[in-house]
């Protein structure tokens, strides 16, 4: 990575940071602010980076940022798709393919997610790749950020890795399998005819999972819009929730949020998530 690109990367980060108000990303404004936009430490906090590391990036120094860090910075700074791609190129990193775990997240969905501070919520793709989670969602579902390649899709893991099913009671596995397959068929049909990502995933699952192949042959089709789910939490046990979906205009991304199911005692369990945190329940990074 050349010195000129390092310098431009730092200048670009500073310019994007200056245009964002704390309220835009769910941070308090405070009585005294010496900068018009976010402070460096606030960007570092939002991106999950150390303050020293982010300072080095803005100075045009330091090490080449990883693809994961660029994706985190793009989300923290609410970059548009074009701005996100430009940031990758400045860092001499390949621009991620659509649908990967580093995909650009719609800024409007990020804004809504930042306002859901006490409700578990996350943004996923139509192929069930988790793009970003808020802390309550990590506490409820485990950290989904460490998966790459085909394994980034929860649907792919559901049919190829038995441990992925621990999130649901065994009695619900058959129903979840059917719902995932019907949703995948609907999502694949909605994509452009030249799109190969969904087709490659379907072919992979047909070859790897007899269960998936049998369900695919049924030709069921239905988007998952509103579900009542029973989730198995390793500390709190069974939690029954309503899962609601907000779709982006092109259907490629969804904001999911989880509320206590009416008529159950799940409200108290969800309240306890903020107390338990994520230390005991994060999935191991592959």
Image (tube, rainbow, N blue to C red):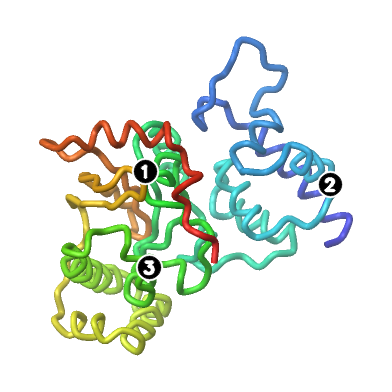
10 Å crowding of disc 3: few (<14), some (14-19), many (20+): few
For the residues labelled 1 and 2, the Cα–Cα distance comes to: 35 Å
Q: Secondary structure at mark 3?
A: helix
10 Å crowding of disc 2: few (<14), some (14-19), many (20+): some
Q: Earlier in the sequence, mark 2 or mark 3?
A: 2
Placement of 262 over or under 221, stated as above or below: above
Residue at label 1?
A: 121
- Give the total of numbered labels: 3
Q: Earlier in the sequence, mark 1 or mark 3?
A: 1
Dividing the picture into quadrants, the one containing residue 16 is: top right
Nearer the observer: mark 2 or 3; the answer is 3
Q: Position of residue 92 (x, y in %)?
A: 74, 64
Placement of 51 over or under 255, stated as above or below: above
Extreme residue in the bottom direction = 207
Kindly check if marks 1 and 2 are in contact, taking CB atoms under 8 A apart as contact: no
Foreground of the two, 166 or 9? 166
Q: Position of residue 13 (x, y in %)?
A: 71, 42
Q: Position of residue 72 (x, y in %)?
A: 59, 49
Quadrant, the C terminus: bottom right
- In the picture provided, is 235 more to the left or to the right than 102? left
Residue 163 numbered tag: 3
Q: Position of residue 224 (x, y in %)?
A: 22, 58
Extreme residue in the top direction = 31
Q: Earlier in the sequence, mark 1 or mark 2?
A: 2
For the point 57% across and 66% down, which residue is it? 96
Residue 60 numbered tag: 2
For the residues labelled 1 and 3, the Cα–Cα distance comes to: 22 Å
10 Å crowding of disc 1: few (<14), some (14-19), many (20+): many
Dividing the picture into quadrants, the one containing residue 86 is: bottom right
For the point 34% across and 69% down, which residue is it? 155
Q: Secondary structure at mark 1?
A: strand
Placement of 123 over or under 35, stated as above or below: below
């Amino acid at each position: 990575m050349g010195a000129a690109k390092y310098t431009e990367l730092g200048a670009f980060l500073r310019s994007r940071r200056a245009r964002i108000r704390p309220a835009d990303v769910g941070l308090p404004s405070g009585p005294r602010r010496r900068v018009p936009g976010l402070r460096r430490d606030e960007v570092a906090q939002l991106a999950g980076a150390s303050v020293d590391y982010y300072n080095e990036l803005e100075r045009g120094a330091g090490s080449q940022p990883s693809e994961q860090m660029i994706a985190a910075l793009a989300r923290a700074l609410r970059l548009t798709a074009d701005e996100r791609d430009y940031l990758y190129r400045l860092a001499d990193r390949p621009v991620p393919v659509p649908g990967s775990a580093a995909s650009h997240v719609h800024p409007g969905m990020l804004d809504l997610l930042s306002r859901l501070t006490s409700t578990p919520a996350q943004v996923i793709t139509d192929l069930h790749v988790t793009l970003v989670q808020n802390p309550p969602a990590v506490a409820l579902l485990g950290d989904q950020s460490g998966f790459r390649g085909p394994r980034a899709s929860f649907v792919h893991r559901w049919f190829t890795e038995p441990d992925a099913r621990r999130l649901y009671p065994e009695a619900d596995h058959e129903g979840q399998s059917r719902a995932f397959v019907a949703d995948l068929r609907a999502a694949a049909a909605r994509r452009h005819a030249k799109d190969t990502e969904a087709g490659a995933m379907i072919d992979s699952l047909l070859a790897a999972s007899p269960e998936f192949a049998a369900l695919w042959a049924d030709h069921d089709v239905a988007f998952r819009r509103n579900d009542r789910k029973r989730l198995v939490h390793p500390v709190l046990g069974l939690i029954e929730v309503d899962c609601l979906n907000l779709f982006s205009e092109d259907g490629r991304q969804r904001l999911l949020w989880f509320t206590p199911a009416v008529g159950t005692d799940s409200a108290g369990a969800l309240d306890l998530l903020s107390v338990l945190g994520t230390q005991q329940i994060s999935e191991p990074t592959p």
